[in-house]
Image: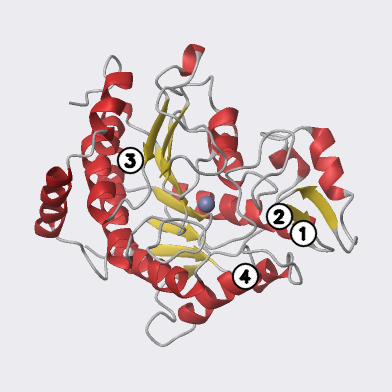
């Protein structure tokens, strides 16, 4: 079935960190935007104009002191926010536009202007915590989007799926004690930032509303598909979110310089299909992807292309293909799924 897919795409996202020697470079988005301007992709998606987030939006998640500290970098040639994260003259404004792009996309999905959307923004967000930047992230785009959906749009339950190579420690910390956001992360372990072990399942009212699937290096399409089928989908069905947000990192791509995972563009399309199926069952298909990492620009370009085709229904990964990958994963006998089940089976219908 064809779907109306929105995208956030704006040249102003290239203004952050243009002269830094950092893997999170403007050329990542340049490649993706170049693909979107090609005849194969042009005019296929509804362009959603981003707005600049305001301080009130940021304060849904971040402290005023931290926001003021980042705001003070405006116009400064170089500020070190964290060993991996630097601000240049226009980084603060670009980060506001990144958050605002996600909020524009959220509103478009909730209002039904589009069926689903992909915010192709930078800087990324999932390592940013209430009071600090980390891992190339300045403001936590997805956490602010989830908090905005709850407080300003009246949604009750948000599912965040984080398939970036790295554990989204910022997002996990921000929602660790609430059941209104279920954070599901699948990531390489051990790896930066070091968190995301399977015993981290939330606390207090949030107990069982954080689910971590730490994978050994070299996991392939089959392993990811198995985790989505056996863990993510049953949890989503039981939780019944009002929308699904995805921290879509492409550093699990098979040739990414920062990771060891083996996911291909077809693998990304398959993960997208599995999340779309969950969204169709739970929340009339409402789904918003937000770009996180992905440092092989060629891989990023092709993988984002595969995801967008799947989101809009131009391609449709078949059940047969999914079954074949599940069968492959069964042969590998990875022990991670039973280990995660042991942590969360009291709450979620996983077996
Ligand atoms: Zn990452």
- Element at label 2: helix
In the displayed structure, would residue 124 be above or below residue 279? Answer: below
* The one of 155 and 166 positioned closer to us in this rendering: 166
Q: Which residue is mark 3?
A: 283
* The one of 32 and 145 positioned closer to us in this rendering: 32
Q: Which residue is mark 2?
A: 95
Q: Which mark is residue 321?
A: none
Spatial separation of the CA atoms under disc 4 and disc 3: 28 Å
Question: Can you say which quadrant of the picture contains the N terminus?
Answer: bottom left
Residue at image location 40% in from the left, 27% down from the top: 198
Q: Is mark 1 within 8 Å of ligand 1?
A: no
In the displayed structure, would residue 120 be above or below residue 305? Answer: above
Q: Is residue 143 rendered to the left or right of residue 180? A: right
Of mark 4 and mark 2, the one earlier in the sequence is 4
Of mark 4 and mark 3, the one earlier in the sequence is 4
- Element at label 4: loop
Residue at image location 90% in from the left, 62% down from the top: 75
* The one of 163 and 312 positioned closer to us in this rendering: 163
Nearer to us of marks 2 and 3 is: 2
**Is mark 2 in CB contact (under 8 Å) with mark 1?**
yes
Nearer to us of marks 3 and 1 is: 1
Q: Which residue is mark 4?
A: 10
Of mark 3 and mark 1, the one earlier in the sequence is 1
Spatial separation of the CA atoms under disc 4 and disc 1: 15 Å
**Is mark 3 in CB contact (under 8 Å) with mark 1?**
no
Q: Which mark is residue 91?
A: 1
Nearer to us of marks 4 and 1 is: 1
**Is mark 4 in CB contact (under 8 Å) with mark 3?**
no
The location of residue 129, given as percent across then percent down, is 66, 36
């Amino acid at each position: 079935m064809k779907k109306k897919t929105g995208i956030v795409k704006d040249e102003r996202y290239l203004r952050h960190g243009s002269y830094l020697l950092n893997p999170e470079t403007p050329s990542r988005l340049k490649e993706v935007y170049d693909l979107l301007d090609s005849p194969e992709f042009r005019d296929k998606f509804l362009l959603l104009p981003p707005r600049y987030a305001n301080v009130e939006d940021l304060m849904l998640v971040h402290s005023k002191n931290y926001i003021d500290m980042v705001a003070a970098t405006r116009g400064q040639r170089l500020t070190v926010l964290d060993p991996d994260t630097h601000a240049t003259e226009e980084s603060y404004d670009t980060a506001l536009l990144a958050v605002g792009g996600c909020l524009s996309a959220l509103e478009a999905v909730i209002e039904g202007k589009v069926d689903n959307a992909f915010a192709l923004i930078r800087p990324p967000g999932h390592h940013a915590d209430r009071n600090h930047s980390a891992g190339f992230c300045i403001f936590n785009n997805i956490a602010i989007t989830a908090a905005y959906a709850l407080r300003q749009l009246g949604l009750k339950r948000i599912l965040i799926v984080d398939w970036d190579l790295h554990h989204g420690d910022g997002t996990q910390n921000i929602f660790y004690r609430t059941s209104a956001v279920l954070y599901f992360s699948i990531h390489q372990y051990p790896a930066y930032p070091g968190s995301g072990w399977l015993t981290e399942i939330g606390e207090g009212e949030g107990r069982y509303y954080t689910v971590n699937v730490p994978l050994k290096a070299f996991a392939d399409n089959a392993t990811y598909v198995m985790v989505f089928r056996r863990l993510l989908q049953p949890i989503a069905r039981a939780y019944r979110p009002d929308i699904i947000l995805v921290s879509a990192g492409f550093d699990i791509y098979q040739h990414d310089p920062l990771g060891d995972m083996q996911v291909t563009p077809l693998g990304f399309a398959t993960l997208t299909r599995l999340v779309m199926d969950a969204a169709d069952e739970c929340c009339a298909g409402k789904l918003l992807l937000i770009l996180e990492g992905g440092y092989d620009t060629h891989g990023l370009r092709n993988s984002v292309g595969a995801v967008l085709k799947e989101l809009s229904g131009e391609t449709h990964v078949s059940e047969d293909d999914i079954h074949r990958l599940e069968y492959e994963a069964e042969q590998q006998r990875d022990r991670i799924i039973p280990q995660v089940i042991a942590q969360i089976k009291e709450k979620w219908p996983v077996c």
